[in-house]
Amino acid sequence: QVQLVESGGGLVQAGGSLRLSCAASGRTFSNYAMGWFRQAPGKERQFVAALSWSGASRYYADSVKGRFTISRDNANNTMYLQMNTLKPEDTAVYYCAARNTGVAHTSLREYEYWGQGTQVTVSS
């Protein structure tokens, strides 16, 4: 089993940037594909980005493509989400997730482990 803790959320103006981190502990981090998801008030949790165990394969939601970058540091058991040119519609709780395989996936149902989430608020 792996435990996940997100950090780096906060309040930022539109056009600004934030970097989220997801620290993992427990089992071998490099065994897991990882993903970021987000949930806005009153909406379902949705896919943001995912990457394979090595980071070689990366996937993005169309709404964040070109603005967000997902990455991982297997030596330090940490995943990141660099968010640039933020928009008010990016406001949500952001969750990191781990999948019991090295292959990334865009469906939240494919992820077994979840963090508690970190709030990102983008003001207009």
Image (cartoon, helix red, strand yellow):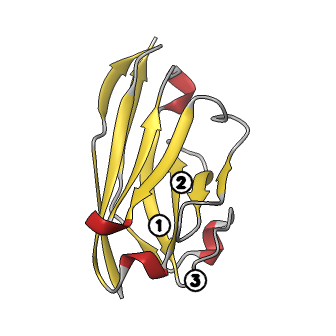
Nearer to us in this view, 88 or 111: 111
Q: Position of residue 92 (x, y in %)?
A: 46, 40
Distance, label 3 to label 1, CA atoms, is 12 Å
Q: Are marks 3 and 1 in contact (CB under 8 Å)?
A: no
**Which amino acid is tagged 1?**
Ala
**Which amino acid is tagged 3?**
Thr
Q: Which residue is mark 1?
A: 97
Indicate left or right for 41 with 13 as reference.
right
Q: Position of residue 40 (x, y in %)?
A: 52, 42
Q: Which residue is mark 2?
A: 37
Indicate left or right for 15 with 65 as reference.
left
Q: Is residue 109 above or below residue 119?
A: below
Nearer to us in this view, 82 or 45: 82
Residue at 59%, 51% in the rendered image: 49
Q: Nearer the viewer, mark 3 or mark 2?
A: 3
Task: Name the image quarter holding the N terminus.
Answer: bottom left
Indicate left or right for 17 with 66 as reference.
left
For label 3, the crowd category at 10 Å Cα-Cα, with few meaning under 14, some 14 to 19 and many 20 or more, is some
Q: Is residue 106 visible?
A: yes
Q: Is residue 59 above or below residue 31?
A: above
Q: Are marks 1 and 2 in contact (CB under 8 Å)?
A: yes
Q: Which residue is mark 3?
A: 101
Q: Quadrant of residue 74?
A: bottom left
Which type of secondary structure does the marked residue at label 2 adopt? strand
Q: Is residue 44 visible?
A: no
For label 2, the crowd category at 10 Å Cα-Cα, with few meaning under 14, some 14 to 19 and many 20 or more, is many
